[in-house]
Amino acid sequence: MTRRVQLAVIISLSALVLAGCGGGSPDPTRTTSAPPSTSKQSLAPPINNPVSADAYKDRMCDLLTPAQRATVGATRAPAPRESVLGPSCVWNASDVSVDTRVSATLYAKPEAVRWERFFELKDQNPFFEPAGELAGTPAVHTHDEKKAERGGCTTHLGLNKDLMMEVAVNLALDNPDYKTPCKVSDRMATFVIQNLRAGS
């Protein structure tokens, strides 16, 4: 999986939101976005049990415990980052030669795409698959290829109407779940939601 390509798709979705605000080229630094239309039926599944992420915005790397990330082999010390979408954390395998990675990114910046709009723009993703609910939170899978069968999958979560999160995995070729990586991204996402709810 190429996370750079996957991130480019999400940035493009956010840029499309901004492009609807006026003429000219999309400006990713703008802080306003057009709300989804209320005149048509929503494509997004409802968020019946919203959750806040305020308690973790400044400590994203606490969203997975060492025991939880060890289940996928991501045991190296976490690396906090600031992405174009919001705060993020990356967990890697302790062996740098092993291509195993888990990341969590909060879509906290004003220009980041929101849950309703994300579904309106779903055709921008080569792979887009509703995933039901995880720990009471609606979820969807995406990937930068037409199928998520080569170690990479991203699970997107609708935390509340104004906030999304993604949990992505990249698995090594010898991982038993290499061909079904969305199972693993869902498992990591479930841990994240449970920890969010416990810490809210």
Image: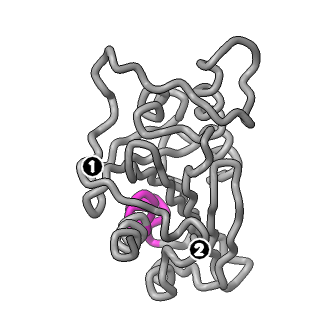
The image's mark for residue 24 is none
Name the spot of residue 34 as percent of width and height, x first: 53, 24
Instruction: Examine the structure image and report whether residue 180 is included in the region drawn in magenta.
Output: yes
Name the quadrant containing residue 29: top right
Name the spot of residue 12 as percent of width and height, x first: 65, 33
CB atoms at circles 2 and 1 under 8 Å apart? Answer: no
User: Label 1: few (<14), some or many (≥20) within 10 Å?
Assistant: few
Decide: is 17 above or below 104. above
Quadrant location of the C terminus in the rendered image: bottom left
Name the spot of residue 25 as percent of width and height, x first: 76, 19
Of residue 197 and residue 4, the one placed in the foreground of this image is 197
User: Label 2: few (<14), some or many (≥20) within 10 Å?
Assistant: few
Residue type at mark 2 is Arg
Name the front one of labels 2 and 1.
Answer: 2
Of residue 140 and residue 35, the one placed in the foreground of this image is 35
Decide: is 103 above or below 42. below
Report the residue at 39% width, 53% height from top: 159
Residue type at mark 1 is Gly
Report the residue at 55% width, 63% height from top: 104
Report the residue at 63% width, 26% height from top: 18
Q: Report the predominant secondary structure element of the magenta stretch.
A: helix
- Looking at the rendering, the stretch of residues picked out in magenta corresponds to 176-188
Instruction: Examine the structure image and report whether residue 178 is included in the region drawn in magenta.
Output: yes
Return the residue at label 2: 59
Of residue 45 and residue 74, the one placed in the foreground of this image is 45
Instruction: Tell which circle, 2 or 1, labels the residue nearer the N-terminal end.
Output: 2
Return the residue at label 1: 132
Q: What is the CA distance from the residue labelled 2 to the residue labelled 1?
A: 27 Å
Report the residue at 37% width, 66% height from top: 193
